[in-house]
Amino acid sequence: MKKTLSLLAVLFLITASAFGDDADNYITNGNAKYTEGNWDGAIADFNKAIELKPDDADAYFGRGAAKVGKGDLNGAIADYTKFLEIKPDNIESYIGRGMAKYAKGDLDGAIADFNKVIELNPEDARAYIGRGAAKYGKGDLDGAITDLSKSIELRPNNADSYYNRGAAKEDKRDLDGAIADFNKSIELKIDYTSAYERRGSAKFSKGDWDGAITDYTIAIEIKPGDARDYYNRGFVKQAKGDWDGAITDFNKAIGLKTDYAEAYINRGFVKQAKGDWDSAITDYNKGIELKPDNDNAYCIRGDLKQNKGDLDGALADFNKAIGLNPNDFAIYYNRGNVEVAKRDWDSAISDGTIDRTRLFQSG
């Protein structure tokens, strides 16, 4: 009996070793497919490795990374969590899980994972980048800037850290600081489209409209298929009074993104400024059709209808705008003007009273 047990034990060891070798082969193949971007193939190989060797942490890690690639964030988080059950305190899995939580919108969960990484290795710049991004998402701009500054201290040549810190500074209205960070991110990564876009936004806020147009133009040269950049450049041209240039850019934005409600609305505004009122209303109609909860669109269409003498149409638009945004005092005033034109004195007085009362209360 003892000899039989001994032989069975040897056989088990040999079999287990063979399974282990097979599992390792599947992991190797899965890693290769992951590198190629073949997420499904990689996941299939990692599945097979786990089937053969259920406690192989590397298979869960690889499968989690591939699931991130596929966009299966819940599945990725589950795999990283399983890895950490087998191998606690593994920095790479906390980083991976934190990034997946961030992408999923679980900002507190992401911060907790990045906190753990920093506890394990206070010099890991990635954790500060990730935690800074999560804090930015939560609106903690000062916390984000602090973390991103630390990441820059640890990894001074990372363009993303400068870009993210610049975004936080721009939101804090530190426009000069934001532009300095966007400059640095572009210096490190010359084709950083997002940095040109955000720098253009900061320059626009500073009143440097020509500088903003230049940045949006560079972004368009790098990525000519992005409707947003044409829209943004058109918006700056609109602010400069370059009506024809603005319309050209809004046309291009709409051509690239036919459901771009804001582009229709702003093109309508420029057409209205040029005196092309009927075409402007057509654009407002389309913008409202695409985005029916835009109270401003109803307001500007209502103004134009009033100018055209369509008082009933104007009144309907102001009513709709008030329904969407009952705290915008100016809409009541505008509706009151229409009611005066319609000689609806009681309603006009009511809207005038609401306007004065609310303004008084707000002051």
Image (cartoon, rainbow, N blue to C red):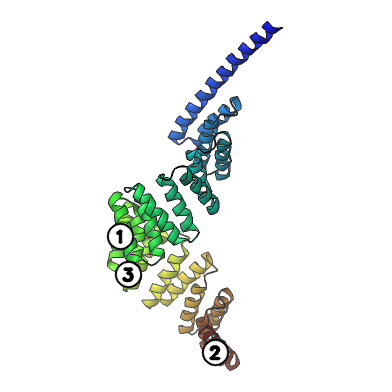
Foreground tag (3 vs 1): 1
Residue at point 41%, 57% (across, down) = 146
Identify the secondary structure beneath mark 2: helix
Q: Nearer the viewer, residue 87 or 195?
A: 87
In the image, residue 173 lies at what x, y percent? 38, 67
168 versus 112 height, above or below: below
**Mark 2 — residue?**
352
| Quadrant of image for the N terminus | top right
Q: Is residue 40 visible?
A: no
| Separation (CA) of disc 2 from disc 1 | 47 Å
**Mark earlier in primary sequence (3, 1):** 1
Q: Nearer the viewer, residue 93 or 345?
A: 93
Left or right of residue 188: residue 101: right
Could you classify mark 3 by the number of other residues whose Cα lies within 10 Å: few (under 14), some (14-19), or many (20 or more)?
A: some
Residue at point 51%, 42% (across, down) = 94
2 versus 169 height, above or below: above
**Mark 1 — residue?**
180
**Residue kind at label 1, given as amino acid type:** Ala
Residue at point 41%, 60% (across, down) = 168
**Mark 3 — residue?**
206
**Mark earlier in primary sequence (2, 1):** 1
Q: Nearer the viewer, residue 265 or 142?
A: 142
In the image, residue 100 lies at what x, y percent? 52, 46
**Residue kind at label 2, given as amino acid type:** Gly
| Separation (CA) of disc 2 from disc 3 | 36 Å
Residue at point 55%, 69% (across, down) = 293
Q: Is residue 119 visible?
A: yes
55 versus 117 height, above or below: above
**Residue kind at label 3, given as amino acid type:** Lys
Disc 2 + disc 3, Cβ < 8 Å: no
